[in-house]
Amino acid sequence: MPKSQLQCYGESVYCINEDYLTRCPRGKSSLERFTSVVAWSISTMRPAIFGLAPFDPILGETHHVSRGSLNVLLEQVSHHPPVSALHATDAKENIELIWWHSLVTSFHGTSVEAVINGKRQLKLLTFGEDYEMDSPNLVVRLLPTTGADWLGDVKIRCKDSGLEANLCYHKSQSFLGFGGNSRSVRGNIFDSKTSKTIYEIDGQWDSIVNLKDVHSGEVTVLYDAKKAISKLKTPVLEAPENLWPTESATVWREVSQAILNMDWEKASEAKRRIEEKGRELHREWKSRGEVWVPKHFSVAHTKDNEWDCCPLEHSVPLAPIAVPP
């Protein structure tokens, strides 16, 4: 795939047609805002393409893009293990996003599973509400049929309101691995204080996901993938003089262009030079006794040995790359 994994993470936030993120702070009640957050969380799950994988980001690589009043910044804060951090702010809607992801892959004979460790925080600053959520895992099936899908459990919670949601991304029943729908999602929204279910969630995350009120029986559409991720617009470089040399599009430009031209030999050679340069820098730091430090995030480890990535700046500035209105 002619793009970096860092860019793929960013696209799940800023590449959207129907904006589910800005709906979150516009809810009139905590419950309405929570259901909007659940819908937005589902919207970040994009169909994976079997046989195509993005580049592994190099240490210090960045990706900085704006969409309207939303400014998104990512940085690769570790290479071994690979850890990506994201900070996004929207001053108009008073929204802040802080993520960190670490990808761990394992082979299971007939499939390869990419476990996405990390934490996602969405803050609705106007209401003082902090939402935490995790991510399903990406499973690449090799036999009996090929495919790549998001599978696993996701928990979304807001301690400020006491509301929680459990989502299960799963494959519906099939016969000997054939048939069935591998893009099903099911779950519920409940009050953690009483453990009573308020809504049930059911559908296909790449199509329609419905929300059912367990008290009235009313069913509404929670998420519509066709409206959300169709007719996506390509980001445009508006201020080349402000483009950082660490920007994903700059780092991988030659490799991406060679792939698009189907010049595999040139792509491999360009990729090898980038990776060798990274190894050379690492050797230089080691010889001088230096430790590389991220430019945009502070990095620490919790008592559970998990990563903790905090943005160094209060807000993300306007980016030189922007999604057209």
Image: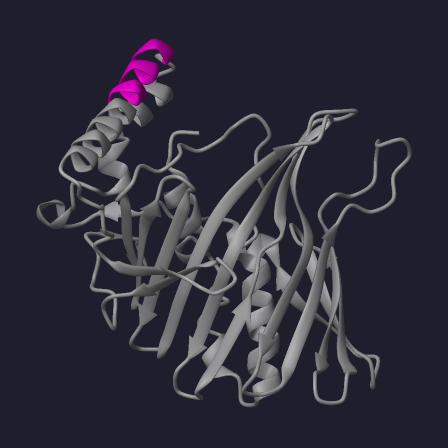
- Number of labels in the image equals 0
Whether residue 28 appears in magenta in the rendering, the answer is no
Q: Which of 180 and 195 is in front in this view?
A: 195
For the stretch drawn in magenta, the main secondary structure is helix
Q: Which of 206 and 168 is in front in this view?
A: 168
Q: Which residue lies furthest to the top in this view?
A: 265
Q: Residue furthest left?
A: 241
Residue drawn 24% across and 20% down? 273
Quarter of the view holding residue 90? bottom left
Q: Against 137, is 98 above or below? A: below
Query: Percent position (x, y) of residue 31?
Result: 62, 85
Quarter of the view holding residue 81? top left
* Quadrant where the C terminus is found in the figure: bottom left
Quarter of the view holding residue 192? bottom right
Residue drawn 73% across and 66% down? 210
Whether residue 271 appears in magenta in the rendering, the answer is yes
Query: Percent position (x, y) of residue 187?
Result: 75, 66
Q: Which of 121 and 186 is in front in this view?
A: 121
What segment carries the magenta color?
A: 264-273
Q: Against 194, is 187 above or below? A: above
Q: Which residue lies furthest to the right in this view?
A: 175
Q: In this view, does 166 lie to the left or right of 286?
A: right
Q: Is residue 66 left or right of residue 127?
A: left
